[in-house]
Image: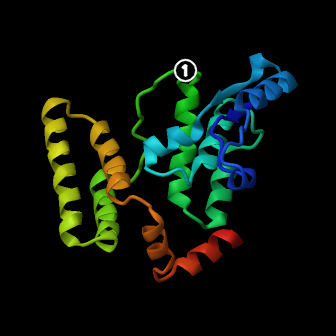
Amino acid sequence: MLANTHLGSTAEFTRNPDFDSRKAGLLEKVGAACGDERLTSFDAHNRVQEQFGDSTSVNMFLIGHAWQQGLIPVSEAALMQAIALNGVSIEANKRAFAFGRVVAAGGSLAGESQALVPVRSEGWRSLVERRAAELIGYQNVAYAQKYRALVERCAATEQKVAGGDLLLTGTVVNNLFKLMAYKDEYEVARLYRSPGILRRAEAAVRG
């Protein structure tokens, strides 16, 4: 049994800001139902957020984690075909699935801190350009250039000191963007007004 310990906001919270979700009690009930020795629980939301900069692919991460443990009696080829047929965020979903497998292969996450694993097929430079383009829309070209400059400085330093897969740089690419493009109510309103947002939302629902 695999449980994500991250709790999202519920309708009750909007009416009662002191609402207690009783997370520990919920986990106890799950453990009692399936057996504590068969329960793996951790904050999947946080793990995906750290690796990819957002949590939109957490469900696919959990599928990959569960599949690696033999909890899903479906072949990997069939799952990859399903992702392709769905036609929504295909590469992102494949990366999340792969990341879930890698984390599961590394053992239990409960109470442990594990290093990030470079599972992205997208090179960090192309990811920087994509993030920078979004920062131009968020503010302006100069703001995006500040982002590029800091990431480039980080990459140059890490390459000189450690070389290899530039794991630190990958983390900076995602988390610096998250910091610089903070999603307050004004930014959310801007995104809702952006061209194509309704088409993407409709495609996601149909998918």
Return the x and y of residue 129 as percentages of the image width and height: 28, 63
How many numbered tags mark residues here?
A: 1
From the viewer's perspective, tell me whether residue 204 is left or right of residue 26.
Answer: left
Q: Which residue is mark 1?
A: 111
Write the residue at 15% across / 30% down: 161
Write the residue at 43% across / 50% down: 53
User: Which quarter of the figure has residue 39?
Assistant: top right
Check the image and report above or below for 29 versus 145.
above
The amino acid beneath tag 1 is: Gly
Return the x and y of residue 35 as percentages of the image width and height: 82, 20
From the viewer's perspective, tell me whether residue 151 is left or right of residue 13.
Answer: left
User: Which quarter of the figure has residue 200?
Assistant: bottom right
Write the residue at 14% across / 46% down: 153
Q: Residues within 10 Å of mark 1 (few under 14, many from 20)?
A: few
Which of the pair 5/107 is nearer the observer? Answer: 5
Q: Specify whether residue 33 is in view.
A: yes
Q: Specify whether residue 70 is in view.
A: no
Tag 1's secondary structure? loop
Check the image and report above or below for 169 versus 184.
above
Q: Residue reaching furthest bottom? A: 195
Write the residue at 30% across / 59% down: 126
Return the x and y of residue 146 as percentages of the image width and height: 18, 59
Return the x and y of residue 73 as percentages of the image width and height: 78, 39
Check the image and report above or below for 30 versus 165.
above
